[in-house]
Structure formats: structure tokens, C-alpha cells
Image: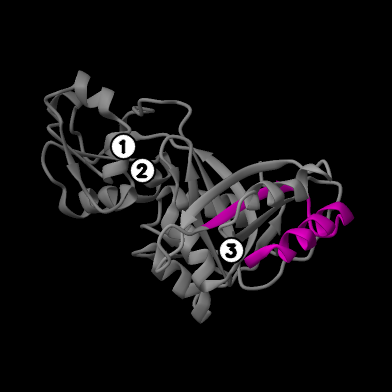
């Protein structure tokens, strides 16, 4: 994606959240980051033109898929233009001269607190307190200067708001990664065909014997590699499902084009969500 000075990229959460770091990884430091309260408002900002791109988390190695965002991909119809992943490192952040032995409260998003249970077990004098956002908890501490209190968030949040990191990497599992999508409203032009590409697709099938087997054969018979397949319940249609699928390759590859065309013939609903080159 072209890096423009006036580009606005929408994210959920305050500046300094992990989505903020992912956005910087995608578009660099020249773009303006638009902070949104909810995932839905991120998609609305992109739809309305308030943002020219958006960055959303789509999957975490510990907690699985962000199902709300899969639903929004269908409802709002943006294009997936990029993918990257971040290791989620949680840090204990304070303001002022508070010592670690003086900390009695730690604010953060409930998911972040849950990922630091071993830290709280070893330091049971510190009470975890849920807050709406990781970076937001750092911002709140800077504004309120609460006594004996800390926040748990990224190193980027500490740097952005002027906090001091007391303890680094307090998360329980070092294999905690989140996968993010870069979204746009336009179809992305494939440029460097030497680099690997991925394509994401959503589809539904008739409830018939062998339907999913036949759908998967579209790719197996062409030696195409699938990196993920997941089902989601269809709203207002109990016990029927929408499938999300990621495969290696782009629709410009004749084998991929043939497989997707074959799949579309047997589906009730079919949509290519985007083709993109993952960012290391």
C-alpha cells in the first residue's frame, strides 16, 4: 500500500494499543491513526471515508479467532489488503516514582489481565482491575495519577504516554501472537509476484452429504495448500454455517482461479475477502 502523509488508518482502542503497533508496521509512521471505541466503529470509519484503511485483529494463538470481526468482514465488505502478526508482550507500567513494592492495583483489558495470571499469583498483593483498553489504562493513569497503581500494556503505550516500565514481559505464555488484517475499500493490485500470497474466502454450502468434502477437493486436486478453515453460525439460520478459508496463492494463479471458480459453482454464498502478501 502506498504510504501517504494524509492517510488515516482506523484502529480499535487508544493510541499505543497493539493494533496501533500493527498499523505502524503496515504503513509506517507517516499515517494518522484514528482511534475508535469499538470494532464496529472501525469498519464504519472505513465505510464512510473517515479512514482510508483500517487494521483489525483477526486471530490470537491463545484465544482463537475474533469472531466479531469475521462477521464485520461480511457485513461491510472491505478488502483484506495485508496481514501481519505481533508477539503480545505485556508490561507493568507506572508514572512517577512508584516502586514495584508499592504497587497495589493493575489496570488493563480483561484479556490482558487473564494472560498475566501467573504474575498475579506470584504477586498477590496486586489486585487486577478491568479497564476497556490496554493503552487506555496507561492514558488513564497519566491523567489521574492514581496512587499505588500501574497499568498493563505494550511498550509502545509506555513510550507514547511517558510511562515507566517496572516489569517487562509479564505474560504467562511467550507464544502469544495476534494476527492482524489491513483493510481497504479498493481491490489491491498485485505487484511483486515473486513473494508469497494468501487469499481469504467466505462461503456457505447446502446441507447435503459430502458437501464440505467436495468443496475441499477443489483445492486438494490442484495441490493447493490451505492454512486455515473455520466455520461460523449463520445468523437467523439455525444449524447452518458460513466457512472462512485461507489458502496460499492469488487468483492470478491459474490453479487458484480454477479452484475458486469450481468452489463457487457448488456454494450458496461465495465471496473473496481479499488477496494479500503477509508482512513479516
Query: Where's the N terminus, which quadrant?
Result: bottom right
Residue marked by disc 1: 164
* Residue at the top extreme of this rendering: 122
The structure residue drawn at horizontal position 20% and vertical position 55%, both measured from the top left corner, is 143
Placement of 190 over or under 123, stated as above or below? below
Provide residue 173's location: percent of width, then percent of height: 41, 26
Quadrant for the C terminus in the image? top right
Say whether marks 2 and 1 touch (CB < 8 Å).
Answer: yes
Q: Residue at x 30, y 30 (%)?
A: 116
Question: Disc 3 to disc 1, how far (Cα)?
Answer: 33 Å
Query: Picture coordinates of residue 203 (x, y %)?
Result: 61, 61
| Disc 3 residue crowd, few under 14, some 14–19, many 20+, Cα 10 Å | many
**Residue designated by label 3:** 183
Q: Are marks 3 and 2 in contact (CB under 8 Å)?
A: no
Residue interval drawn in magenta: 242-271
* Residue 115 lies in the magenta-colored region: no
C-alpha gap between disc 2 and disc 1: 6 Å
Amino acid at each position: 500500500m502506498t504510504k501517504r502523509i494524509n492517510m488515516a488508518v482506523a484502529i480499535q482502542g487508544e493510541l499505543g494499543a497493539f493494533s496501533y503497533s500493527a498499523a505502524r508496521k503496515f504503513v509506517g509512521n507517516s499515517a494518522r491513526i484514528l482511534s475508535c471505541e469499538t470494532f464496529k466503529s472501525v469498519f464504519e470509519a472505513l465505510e464512510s471515508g473517515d479512514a482510508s484503511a483500517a487494521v483489525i485483529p483477526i486471530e490470537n494463538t491463545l484465544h482463537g479467532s475474533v469472531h466479531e470481526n469475521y462477521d464485520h468482514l461480511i457485513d461491510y465488505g472491505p478488502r483484506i489488503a495485508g496481514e501481519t502478526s505481533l508477539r503480545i508482550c505485556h508490561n507493568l507500567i507506572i508514572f512517577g516514582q512508584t516502586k514495584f513494592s508499592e504497587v497495589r492495583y493493575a489496570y488493563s483489558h480483561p484479556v490482558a489481565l487473564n494472560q498475566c495470571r501467573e504474575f498475579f499469583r506470584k504477586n498477590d498483593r496486586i489486585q487486577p482491575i478491568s479497564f476497556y483498553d490496554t493503552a487506555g489504562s496507561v492514558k488513564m493513569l497519566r491523567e489521574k495519577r492514581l496512587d499505588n497503581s500501574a497499568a498493563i500494556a505494550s511498550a509502545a503505550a509506555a513510550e507514547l504516554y511517558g510511562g515507566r516500565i517496572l516489569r517487562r514481559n509479564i505474560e504467562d505464555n511467550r507464544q502469544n501472537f495476534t494476527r492482524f488484517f489491513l483493510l481497504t475499500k479498493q481491490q489491491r493490485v498485485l505487484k511483486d509476484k515473486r513473494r508469497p500470497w494468501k487469499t481469504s474466502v467466505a462461503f456457505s454450502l447446502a446441507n447435503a452429504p459430502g458437501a464440505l468434502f467436495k468443496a475441499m477437493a477443489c483445492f486438494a486436486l490442484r495441490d493447493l495448500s490451505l492454512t486455515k478453515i473455520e466455520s461460523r453460525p449463520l445468523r437467523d439460520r439455525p444449524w447452518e454455517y458460513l466457512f472462512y478459508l485461507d489458502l496460499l496463492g492469488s487468483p492470478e494463479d491459474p490453479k487458484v482461479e480454477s479452484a475458486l471458480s469450481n468452489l463457487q459453482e457448488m456454494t450458496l454464498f461465495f465471496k473473496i475477502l481479499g488477496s494479500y502478501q503477509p508482512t513479516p
